[in-house]
Amino acid sequence: MANMLLEPPFAANPPVKLNVNAKILGLVIGILALIGAVFGGLVGGLFSLFSLAAGGFGGIWLIGILISLIADVIGAIGGFQMYSGNRAGKNLVIYALALGFLGSIVGAIGNIVAYSGIYSLGGYSAGGAIVGLIFGVIVYGIIYYIVVISRWPGDVPLVAAGPTGGYGNPPGGYGSPPPPPPPSA
């Protein structure tokens, strides 16, 4: 039985066909995951610790940050494995995206709890966490889709390459180019 997360039904014939090189995508994901681990873990961890120290409920938020930090590390490892041509790296990246999604949900719940009521910080409300979660769902979904449809060098491309110049002959075509104008006397 196939793993629905690693091999979703749309993978064979995706609705939006893009020829994305898996090796280059792996490098981009690896670098962005490292940046996310450093800044997300540092900044998010500090804010959750400040909330916890102020008597708030930053513990749930901190758990979400730690889950996201683990996901970033796994995503970086998987991304760099993809860049080196290891096909198993794609699976690690997909699992890291799922774990990061879980971390963002737990972090948003902790964020809402930590900054609701009397612990609000400078007008910050739960609306920011909810909007951030919605934005995160969209970003995770797009990255997941691109990782799933990405192709390794040598794989059959999803989209055939078009003509490299001239008029070409598209399906249903428009025939040959018009004749050149007659020379003027």
Image (cartoon, grey):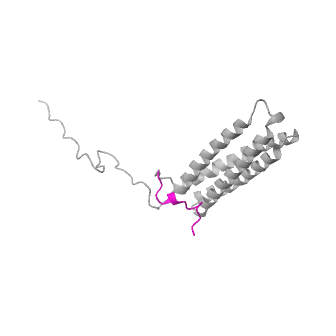
**In this rendering, would 135 be left or right of 175?**
right
* Residue drawn at the location 25% of the way across and 45% of the way down: 174
Q: Which residues are magenta?
A: 1-15
The part of the image, by quadrant, that contains residue 45 is: top right
Decide: is 11 above or below 42. below
Q: Position of residue 95 (x, y in %)?
A: 65, 58
Residue 130 visible in the snapshot: yes
Q: In this view of the protein, which residue sits in the foreground, 79 or 125?
A: 125
Looking at the rendered structure, the number of numbered marks drawn on it comes to 0
Q: In this view of the protein, which residue sits in the foreground, 179 or 10?
A: 10
**In this rendering, would 16 be left or right of 73?**
left
Residue 152 visible in the snapshot: no
* Residue drawn at the location 39% of the way across and 52% of the way down: 161
**In this rendering, would 65 be left or right of 158?**
right
Chief secondary structure of the magenta span?
Answer: loop
User: In the rendered image, which quarter contains the C terminus?
Assistant: top left
Q: Is residue 178 magenta?
A: no
Q: Position of residue 97 (x, y in %)?
A: 64, 53
Q: In the current view of this chain or complex, which residue is farthest to the bottom?
A: 1
User: In the rendered image, which quarter contains the N terminus?
Assistant: bottom right
Q: Position of residue 123 (x, y in %)?
A: 76, 30
Q: Position of residue 98 (x, y in %)?
A: 65, 55
* Residue drawn at the location 70% of the way across and 54% of the way down: 71
Q: In the current view of this chain or complex, which residue is farthest to the left?
A: 185
Decide: is 105 above or below 95. above
* Residue drawn at the location 68% of the way across and 40% of the way down: 130
Q: Is residue 10 magenta?
A: yes
**In this rendering, would 102 be left or right of 86?**
right
Q: In this view of the protein, which residue sits in the foreground, 138 or 45?
A: 138
